[in-house]
Amino acid sequence: MLERKVFVTGATSTIGSLLVPMLKEHGAAVQLLGRRPQESVRGLVWSPLDLEHNAAELPQCETETLIHTASLWLLPGWLEKFNARGVRRVIAFSSTSRFTKQASTSAYEFEVVNKLIAAEEHVAAECERLGMAWTIFRPTLIYGGTGGDRNVADIARLICKFGFFPVFGTGNGRRQPVNAADLAQACVQSLAAPDSYNKAYNLSGGETLAYIDMVRRIFETLGRPPRFIRIPLPAFKLAVKLARLHPRFAHLTPDMALRMQADLVFDHSEATRDFGYRPGKFDPAYLATLR
């Protein structure tokens, strides 16, 4: 049982939507914070808070822990305010993208990388100044939850729409997709593990497979025969440009083609040692709802 009060930001996010019921199941008193205030969510209180535009104030209740599943760069300016509400433990999410996209030619991706790096450094320094124990999680390719992820679910939507998937080169770059449920569980595990305090962890999935094999498994889950069309880079760039016309795929970049060839692999053994992190194999069964 977690005998503590917890603030959760990003409660409707892929990770947050799974974390909240886990915390409740473990006996935590949860206070949800978000931009779209509601009277209650699953019987929990939701307080209005816009971290990006500094809108509204933190609720007056005293809370010991903050789990921040929203964008990391929104957090640093709020830490002193959370500290004033009794928060002494902070868990927040960054991404392994801070390593894998440092050479990106996309201005948007390069900006995100710099924001993540700066936010990680700021959170660590500010928490130490305020006497707050911090833990930063850097997941690899996130999937699961309600299907709102911009990774596996978007691949599935492209397959459902076109019946094939475009591949540049061999597509043999290795991936470690990580289930959002495993990341939510990592938060719960870390809360009761002092060995995880004041550290950052790369959290990869429990299976390493080639990019093309990951996509093949998505085809199989959707009940469709795998169909790959290998196209040259100029054609791939054009396909991305056309896909970006749809708001759902506005985040896609041509660099995705080059990364199909790259190994984006990270070791999570430190997390296993410090708080028992044991992610499962890649299982995109939730995609059945997208058919």
Image (spheres, rainbow, N blue to C red):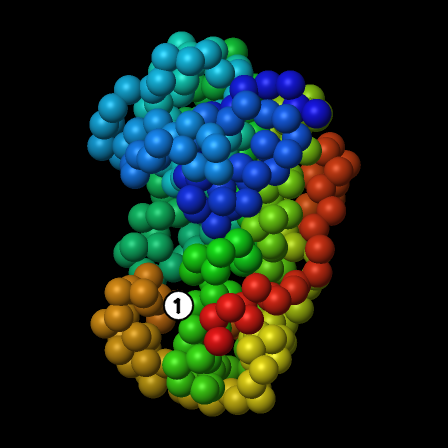
Q: Where is residue 95 in the image (x, y as percent from the top left)?
A: 49, 46
Give the quadrant of residue 54.
Answer: top left
Residue shown at the point (44%, 80%) measured from the top left: 160
Of residues 50 and 96, which is closer to you in this image?
A: 50
Marker count (numbered): 1
Q: Is residue 244 left or right of residue 170?
A: left
Where is residue 272 shown, x and y percent of the image? Answer: 74, 40
Q: In this view, does 58 lie to the left or right of 31?
A: left
Kind of element beneath mark 1: helix
Binning the other alpha carbons within 10 Å of mark 1 as few (below 14), some (14 to 19) or many (20 upward) gives: some
| Rendered residue at 53%/89% (across/down) | 227
Query: What residue is at 54 percent from the left and 58 percent from the top?
Result: 143
Is 60 or 65 nearer to us in this picture?
60
Residue 198 visible somewhere in the drawing: no
Which quadrant, please, contains the N terminus?
Answer: top right
Rendered position, 136 above or below 112:
above
Q: State the image coordinates of residue 264 (x, y, percent, origin top left).
A: 57, 60
Nearer to me, 114 or 134: 134
Relative to 226, 250 lies left or right: left
Q: Is residue 193 above or below residue 166?
A: above
Give the amino acid at mark 1: Asp
**How far across and how far down the image is residue 232, in percent?**
40, 86
In the displayed structure image, the side of residue 32 where residue 218 appears, left or right? right
- Is residue 242 something that shows in the picture? yes
Residue that appears at 53% across and 16% down: 64
| Disc 1 target residue | 255
